[in-house]
Amino acid sequence: MMKFCLKYALGFAVTALVSISASADSVIINDPYVREPVPGRSMSAAFMTLTNTSNELQRLVSVSAPWASSIEIHTHLHEDGVMKMRQIDSLEVPAGESVTLEPGGLHLMLFGLETPLTNELPMTFCFDNSECVAHTARLFSPM
Ligand SMILES: [Cu+2]
């Protein structure tokens, strides 16, 4: 139980720090949501829209959350008529444009979830210009 609390405290501290430094975010995270994992599973996906308000290309390179042990950026590809998931190193958001992560397309793959997840899920999105943006995702239950 102590370990759980410490991890959360650390997560909030990191989130607070990031919020202070990200007063002029180049990329805005719109309506992030986490799909509630299937009971007994510790894996799920997160979706959102990233809007680049700067005049330079921005690349999302890493995402972290205190309630997930690891988060990967994934895309779906058609290979020999089959839809496959593939991890990508970074996600490009062109200057002045938006990129949407949605079911069946780009998504964040979440591993090692601390279930049950709460309704407010802090996440940190880091870009290759070393800027990080914190945002709280909501829990979405498809059932
Ligand atoms: Cu995936």
Image (cartoon, grey):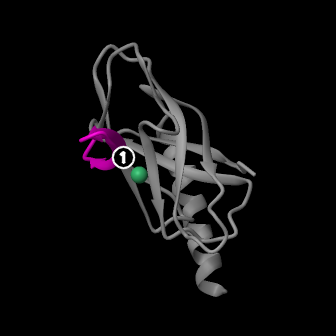
For the N terminus, give its image quadrant: bottom right
- Horizontal side of 78 relative to 114 (left or right) equals left
- Horizontal side of 40 relative to 89 (left or right) equals right
Residue drawn at x 40%, y 16% is: 97
Q: Residue furthest bottom?
A: 1
Residue drawn at x 49%, y 70% is: 112
The vertical placement of 123 against 90, above or below, is below
Q: Position of residue 125 (x, y in %)?
A: 44, 44
Q: In this view of the protein, can residue 77 be seen by the observer?
A: yes
Q: Position of residue 136 (x, y in %)?
A: 63, 46
Identify residue for label 1.
Answer: 74
Q: Position of residue 32 (x, y in %)?
A: 59, 39
Q: Is mark 1 within 8 Å of ligand 1?
A: yes
- Is 102 magenta? The answer is no
Depth order, front residue of 21/133:
133
What range is drawn magenta here? 75-90
Count neighbours of disc 1 (C-alpha within 10 A) and say few if under 14, some if 14 to 19, many if 20 or more. Answer: many
Q: Main secondary structure of the magenta part?
A: strand
- Element marked by disc 1: strand
Q: Position of residue 43 (x, y in %)?
A: 52, 64
The vertical placement of 46 against 13, above or below, is above
Q: Residue furthest front?
A: 81
The vertical placement of 112 against 11, above or below, is below
- Is 84 magenta? The answer is yes
Disc 1 marks which amino acid? His
Residue drawn at x 36%, y 47% is: 73
